[in-house]
């Protein structure tokens, strides 16, 4: 509980830097373009087409939100990028995946998933998925409750919580492909396919897609 409280205090102080109303291209920048690049560039073995199409459809409530706050986002708020300062507050390093106008709750979902994995000593992907379920699914979904409370503090309708959880892992997984290929276009290799299929963030994206109905 203390780790969650300290971590969420860091997430809460990330400033609001704009709104979807004032940034007409926000969806394409943060989600549309990365998802479409993933569908186009992922090796055939990944079978990305259906997953991307379903993700776009499930993100519709988010895309249609009339005045979504955009926030300064770290983008990778987990080990080893978290440090405890002498004051006891949490700090973050390695801002290479940050976005000055990112999605609300991205850092919250990322951080709380990391906490769930740490609580379960989860290293293997199946264990990480079970840790996610413990935090985000069911009547005692402490991580989902923490995200909901964070959205309340941001003035964001809780109805967009499920698409925000899905968006977090979809965006993180799409970033993996770009880091692997080192370019914005060009289909990845067979070696890339193995890495992508074994990746924790891709597994979480696929898993959230499977359990999406349980996040409401």
Image (cartoon, grey):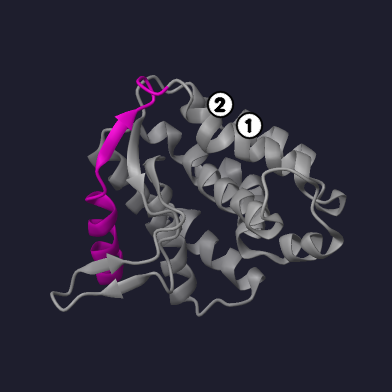
Residue in view at x 43 percent, y 56 percent: 141
Q: Residues within 10 Å of mark 2 (few under 14, many from 20)?
A: few
Q: Nearer the viewer, residue 14 or 58?
A: 14
Residue in view at x 38 percent, y 54 percent: 74
x and y, in percent, of residue 102 in the image? 40, 41
Distance from label 1 to label 2 (Cα)?
7 Å
x and y, in percent, of residue 97 in the image? 46, 54
Relative to 61, is 166 above or below?
below
- Residue that badge 1 annotates: 56
Q: Quadrant of residue 179?
A: bottom right
Left or right: residue 23 compared with residue 133: left
> Looking at the rendering, in which quadrant would you find the N terminus?
bottom left
Relative to 192, is 2 above or below?
below
| First to last magenta residue range | 1-23
Element assignment for label 1: helix
Q: Residues within 10 Å of mark 1 (few under 14, many from 20)?
A: some
Element assignment for label 2: helix
- Residue that badge 2 annotates: 60
Left or right: residue 204 compared with residue 83: right
């Amino acid at each position: 509980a203390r780790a969650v409280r300290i971590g969420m205090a860091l997430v809460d102080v990330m400033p609001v830097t704009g709104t979807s109303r004032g940034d007409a291209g926000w969806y394409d920048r943060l989600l549309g373009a990365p998802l479409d690049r993933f569908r186009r560039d992922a090796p055939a073995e990944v079978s990305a087409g259906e997953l991307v199409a379903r993700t776009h459809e499930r993100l519709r409530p988010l895309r249609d939100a009339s005045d979504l706050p955009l926030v300064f986002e770290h983008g990778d708020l987990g080990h080893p990028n978290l440090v405890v300062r002498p004051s006891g507050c949490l700090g973050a390093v390695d801002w290479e995946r940050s976005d000055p106008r990112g999605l609300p709750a991205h850092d919250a979902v990322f951080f709380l998933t990391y906490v769930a994995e740490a609580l379960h000593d989860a290293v293997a992907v199946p264990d990480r998925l079970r840790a996610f379920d413990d935090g985000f699914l069911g009547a005692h979904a402490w991580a989902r409750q923490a995200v909901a409370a964070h959205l309340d503090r941001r003035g964001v309708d809780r109805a967009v919580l499920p698409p925000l959880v899905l968006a977090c892992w979809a965006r993180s997984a799409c970033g993996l492909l770009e880091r692997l290929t080192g370019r914005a276009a060009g289909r990845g290799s067979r070696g890339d396919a193995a890495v992508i299929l074994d990746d924790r963030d891709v597994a979480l994206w696929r898993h959230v897609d499977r359990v999406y109905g349980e996040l409401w």
